[in-house]
Image (cartoon, helix red, strand yellow):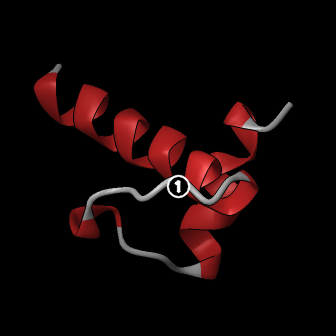
Amino acid sequence: MIAWLRAHLRLLLLAVQFYTRLPVPAWVGYSEELLSQATVYFP
């Protein structure tokens, strides 16, 4: 449960990083694969 929550939090923060200039923690990281998974949180 905790791993699932952390994974989805990472995707949400990656989407925030993509659409805004808000800083996000370094542990979020970036890859094209993660960005494609983060489309769940895009408007």
Label 1, residues with CA under 10 Å away: few <14, some 14-19, many ≥20: many
Q: Going by the image, does 30 lie left or right of 20?
A: left
Residue, x 37% and y 73% (percent of image)?
29
Number of numbered discs on residues = 1
Image position, residue 37 (x, y; %): 63, 53
Q: Which residue is mark 1?
A: 14
Residue, x 55% and y 65% (percent of image)?
34
Q: Name the residue at the right extreme.
A: 43
Q: Name the residue at the left extreme.
A: 2
Residue, x 63% and y 49% (percent of image)?
15
Q: Going by the image, does 2 lie left or right of 38?
A: left
Image position, residue 10 (x, y; %): 38, 47
Q: Going by the image, does 12 lie left or right of 39?
A: left
Q: Nearer the viewer, residue 28 or 39?
A: 28
- 2 over 38 or under it: above or below: above
Quadrant, the C terminus: top right
Q: Quadrant of residue 21?
A: bottom right
Q: Nearer the viewer, residue 43 or 1?
A: 43
Query: As shown in the figure, which amino acid type bears the numbered disc 1?
Result: Leu
